[in-house]
Image: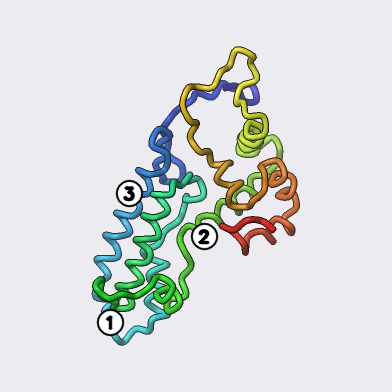
Amino acid sequence: MQLQGHIVESTDRFTYLGSDIHSPERSTPEILRRIGLASNIFGRLANVWKRRGLSLQTKIRLYNALVISVYGSETWTLLKADERRLEAFHVNCQRWILGIHWLHSVTISSVTSQTGEEGLTIRICRRRLSIFGHVRRLPEATPAHSALRLAVDTRASGKPDIRPEWKRQRGRPCRTWVQQFEDDTGLNANDAWRIAHDRKPWMALRPVAGQAFQ
């Protein structure tokens, strides 16, 4: 691909802000790696979660600051299985902090009502909205802006290449980041591109991240 007179080589794996992006396997390897790291940190803080002298509010703040890291997650394209893994880990950690044994029949809603924690997928969705709006408002000459513009145009036309001889490979195409973004907002990519140009209406979408845009 040529961008602003420079040839950009294609790659199926690269590092972005410390995250391992692996195209053939989507974001699953990175998600599993991050869950493993978070689980290790959570286990090392076991004595903190058991301390009765600490309030639940303090424990939750420590949990969010030291264990839960969604940095770079705005680039993830999540499968349903990835979402289940993330939410299962998140809820299990909250159960441990609350001292709920795994044999106890306690609903997820009961757990989250006590901790006040929202789902990880909602947080990630909100970060996707934020990064889309930020990149959209960058100067047009910025490579990130050009790349996102290309992704939006590709989604609208259905073809990443304007050459007439281009043909889509056989099989069902992988779900793209832009498609997931459309699911987040309930908007098509072109409408999202138009709205994101103005920060105020775009920010109004963030409280309903993860739900259909009304």
Q: Secondary structure at mark 3?
A: helix
Residue 125 visible in the snapshot? yes
Q: How busy is the neighbourhood of tag 2: few (under 14 within 10 Å), some, or many (20 plus)?
A: some
Q: Is residue 8 above or below residue 145?
A: above
Residue 195, position in %: x, y? 73, 49
Q: Residues within 10 Å of mark 1 (few under 14, many from 20)?
A: few
Q: At 74% across and 59% down in the image, what residue appears?
A: 200
Q: How is the image coloured?
A: rainbow
Q: Amino acid at mark 1?
A: Arg
Residue sitting at 63 percent across and 60 percent down? Answer: 206
Q: CA distance from mark 3 to mark 2?
A: 20 Å
Task: Please give the residue where the numbered disc 3 appears in the rendered image.
Answer: 33
Residue 201 x, y percent position in the rendering:
74, 57
Secondary structure beneath dot 2 equals helix
Residue type, label 3: Arg
In the image, residue 121 sits, relative to residue 6, either above or below, namely below
Q: Which mark is drawn over residue 123?
A: none
Question: Closest to the observer: 147 or 208?
Answer: 208
Amino acid marked by disc 2: Ile
Q: Are marks 2 and 1 in contact (CB under 8 Å)?
A: no
User: CA separation, marks 3 and 1?
Assistant: 28 Å
Image spot of residue 157 (x, y percent): 67, 29
Judging by the rendered image, the residue that carries numbered circle 1 is: 51
The quadrant of the rendering that contains the N terminus is top right
* Pointer 2 or 1: first along the chain: 1
Which residue has dot 2 on it?
A: 122
Tell me the distance, in whole angstroms, between the alpha carbons under discs 2 and 1. 29 Å
